Amino acid sequence: SGGSIGIGFAIPSALARPIVEQLKATGKVERGWIGARIQPVTDEIAEAVGLDKGRGAMIAAVDPGSPAAQAKLQPGDVILTYDGKQIDRSRQLPRLVADTPPETPIKLTMWRDGKEQEVDLKIAALSLNRPVPPQPEPEKPKPPPSVDALGLKLSKLSPDLRKQFSLPDAVKGVVITEVPQNSPAAAQALRPGDLVIAVGHEAVSAPEEVQQKAAAAKKNGRKNVLVRVEREGNSRFVALPLETS
């Protein structure tokens, strides 16, 4: 009807200014995109990767063919600065990327393998038509043979488990079959059917490999271990305490 519903919305001038400038210059608004999904860096994740404290934005996944992929960014990298601007919280990065005009060259400082590294990439234009992966509900599984690791029950992928959890043939990793209530894993919202695809930056395909890599991290003095988990085509990192392993 075009009438007011009596609620006012205020847009901060710092957010509105780049949009207004683009509209004046080109008559349209283009948002920057690098093709990387990110997540916060908790103090536990920071400890697991050797960073001094929880800061920056951790890359959880990289889209094939994207600017991030072309710059050889990897899941597990932590972006510390963007074009010279410090990234204290992960939510800063999407806004900075979105406000950067497409085709702009950008220098990033990232944390990888225990040290800072610099990488150059070129911002692309965000497309609103990028496909979103389907998110089917997994079936309730039957209890399979399992191994205890990191406070979880883990099983090697099998045809039965793929069917029970609706896991495609292409996915790899170790399937979580049980998450104890009130555990650190439960606090991280892990659930049966999730896949452990890497510990640290090393891929795993058997529960015993998870145990071995957790033991190695503990031997190296780590209190937490970085675990890459995949669910319905999307991956993220969690830090799990080694005391429960």
Image: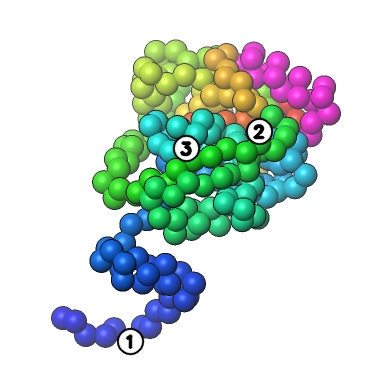
> How far is mark 2 from mark 1, CA to CA?
50 Å
* The image quarter in which residue 160 lies: top left
Residue drawn at x 64%, y 13% as measured from the top left: 208
Crowd class of label 3 (few under 14; some 14 to 19; many from 20; radius 10 Å): many
Residue 29: x, y in percent? 31, 62
Residue 19: x, y in percent? 37, 67
Badge 1 is on which residue?
Answer: 6
Residue 197: x, y in percent? 54, 24
Taking the image as shown, residue 27 lies to the left or right of residue 180, namely left
* The image quarter in which residue 154 lies: top right
Question: Which residues are drawn in magenta?
Answer: 207-225
Taking the image as shown, residue 153 lies to the left or right of residue 213, namely left
Amino acid at pointer 3: Ala
**Which quarter of the image is occupied by the N terminus?**
bottom left
Instruction: Indicate whether 7 appears above or below 107.
Output: below
Badge 2 is on which residue?
Answer: 112
Nearer to us: label 2 or label 1: 2
Residue drawn at x 64%, y 19% as measured from the top left: 210
In the structure shown, which secondary structural element does the residue marked by tag 3 occupy? helix
Instruction: Indicate whether 123 appears above or below 197.
Output: below
Viewer can see residue 33: no
Badge 3 is on which residue?
Answer: 68
Residue 68 or residue 94, whichever sits in front: 68
